Image: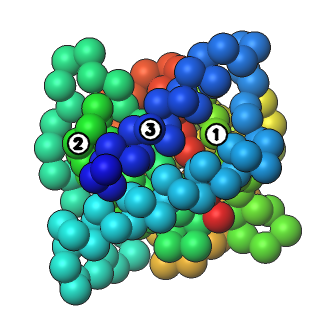
Amino acid sequence: MTSLAKLLAVTGAFALAVTAAPAGATIETPEAKAQAAEAADIARGDVMDHLGDAMLRPGQYRWVSDARPGEPVRVVVSLSDQMAYVYGGDRLLGYSTISSGKAGKDTPTGIFPILEKKTMHRSRKYDNAPMPFMQRLDNYGIAMHAGANPGYPASHGCIRLPAKFAAKLYGVTRVGSTVMIGA
């Protein structure tokens, strides 16, 4: 089985589970966390095949291909690598550096549906901080959005993305798209 096929097998089953879950529900079970970690390992391998020995510096991204109309889009996040990987169907669409939650403000792991999208949102928790291209993942303030990427975990739990990548990602996802966050 190819790495993309493995990823689809992993994310497909959990996409169904997320769809079947009550509105706004996340899946943060030990099984979901393990599946998200496995998806991150697979995605890392796909990007290594694509990049070779090259590494992205903080704030960099690559957009490889555009999504096809109606194609399901999945996001896989690796907290240990500080990377996000985007798949459309069985194809790698893009990958990017991220900045996740700092110690004590950890980004949760598991399987999350995108609950809400706003091109510009302001944090209700953190001094009205701007959150461009916000895609909310839970009911407690965790989201993917454009923000500073210093090369290490620095957020209050959100997944910060380079601005241009956040805009492209925002354009291909929809409410309900699956986001898998692995440790």
**Residue at image location 39% in from the left, 58% down from the top:** 43
**Residue at image location 29% in from the left, 62% down from the top:** 46
Q: Is residue 112 left or right of residue 70?
A: right
**Residue at image location 49% in from the left, 59% down from the top:** 40
Q: CA distance from mark 3 to mark 1?
A: 14 Å
Q: CA distance from mark 2 to mark 1?
A: 20 Å
Q: Are the residues flagged by discs 3 and 2 in contact, CB closer than 8 Å?
A: no
Q: Quadrant of residue 136?
A: top right
Q: Which mark is residue 121?
A: none
Q: Does the image show residue 5?
A: yes
- Picture coordinates of residue 29, whole percent (x, y): 79, 43
Numbered-mark total: 3
| Residue projecting furthest to the bottom | 53
- Picture coordinates of residue 8, whole percent (x, y): 39, 39
* Disc 1: which residue: 111
Q: Quadrant of residue 3?
A: bottom left
* Disc 2: which residue: 91
- The disc labelled 2 sits on which kind of residue? Arg
**Mark 3 vs 1, N-terminal side:** 3
Q: Are the residues flagged by discs 3 and 1 in contact, CB closer than 8 Å?
A: no
Q: Is residue 133 left or right of residue 156?
A: left
- The disc labelled 1 sits on which kind of residue? Ile
- The disc labelled 3 sits on which kind of residue? Ala
**Mark 3 vs 2, N-terminal side:** 3
Secondary structure at badge 1 equals strand
Q: Is residue 180 left or right of residue 129?
A: left
- Picture coordinates of residue 68, whole percent (x, y): 17, 25
On the rendered image, what quadrant is the C terminus found in? bottom right
Secondary structure at badge 2 equals strand
* Disc 3: which residue: 9
* Towards the viewer: 43 or 123: 43
